[in-house]
Amino acid sequence: MNNTRGSLFMVAAMAAFSIEDMLIKAAAETTSLGLILALFGLGGMLIFILLTYRQGQRVIHPAILSKAVLMRAVCEIVGRFCFALAITLTPLSSASAILQATPLIAMIGAALLFGEQVGVKRWLAVLVGFIGVLMIIRPGLAGFETASLFAVVSTLGFAGRDLATRAAPPVLSNLQLGVYGFFVLIPTGLVMLIYQNEPLQINGTATIQILGAIVFGVMAYNALTIAMRAGDVSVIAPFRYTRLLFALALGIFVFGESPDLLTLLGSLLIVASGAYTLMQTRSVLKTNTA
């Protein structure tokens, strides 16, 4: 039951994340990415603070200084920052496709850190997934985009965040983790803004887009936190690949993207490896409970 609940929340989180990505990419066409990240972090933090107070919880909890929470903050910065760059500099569909390698990395981390069982077949699935990533970024080939490496690095950040969420002190609620997760984006965006040295310009359309990204980001963030705390990481994490389906649709219909054959094949390999990993995990769980 916990794994089913976690899987459903993961799918909901991926749909909301895809809409958030679309809105950020659209806003970045007229507004500095540093300003977008800072405002996005501020808005999300304020919403989670209000929700935290409403539940009678402390916004600043001593457990915030635990190693898991601090590591989660670092991974949050790496994941968010690099993926924001990826979706603004490369097609949304290809960046999102690369991001689907996150559950494979999370599975490796779960095996190393939490002792979850990972058999030979699932290790092979990981290898297939990474081959899919290479097909999309195409290192050394004419179609290679250096900016696509930001998407690769973001997978490491998001996988680390998911694992740190699982290791976070149980005393911290999903809402409290949301406050801290969005807070770290504020200084990240401000530092980027200073580095870019761009004028602080924002129009009405971009403002609405950022507000929309905040709303969907909060929804996605809360759903993801619930998902990662609900059951086994190796069962729930593969449902991240549903984000690719949403991203492909938005990329094609909103931004007019046309993913080429190699990108589609690479995406298919990543999704197939995630689905196969899920089936193998269920088989292992059934065997262990029989």
Image (cartoon, grey):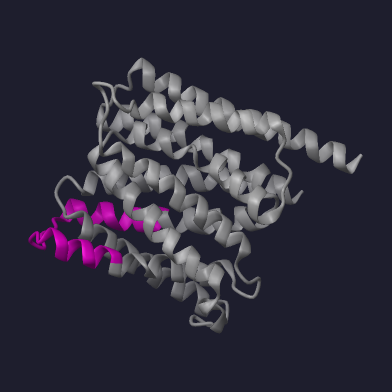
Q: Is 93 displayed left or right of 132 in the figure?
A: left
* x, y percent for residue 167: 62, 64
- The front one of 160 and 93 is 160
Name the outermost residue toward the front.
140
Name the outermost residue toward the top.
261
* Residue at left offset 72%, top offset 48%: 116
- How many marks do you count on the picture? 0
- The front one of 130 and 196 is 130
In the image, is residue 200 part of the stretch drawn in magenta?
Answer: yes
Magenta region, residue range: 188-216
Mainly helix, strand or loop, the magenta region?
helix
Q: Is 233 displayed left or right of 142 in the figure?
A: right
Q: Can you tell which quarter of the image residue 264 is in?
A: top left
* x, y percent for residue 259: 33, 22
Work out which quarter of the rendered image holds the C terminus and state it.
top right
* Residue at left offset 72%, top offset 52%: 115
* Residue at left offset 42%, top offset 33%: 97
Name the outermost residue toward the left.
199
Q: Is 131 displayed left or right of 38 in the figure?
A: right
Compared to residue 138, the image places residue 72 above or below, namely: below
* Residue at left offset 51%, top offset 78%: 65
Compared to residue 31, the image places residue 66 above or below, namely: below
Compared to residue 2, the image places residue 282 above or below, namely: above
* x, y percent for residue 38: 27, 64
* x, y percent for residue 226: 60, 57
Name the outermost residue toward the right.
290
In the image, is residue 213 part of the stretch drawn in magenta?
Answer: yes
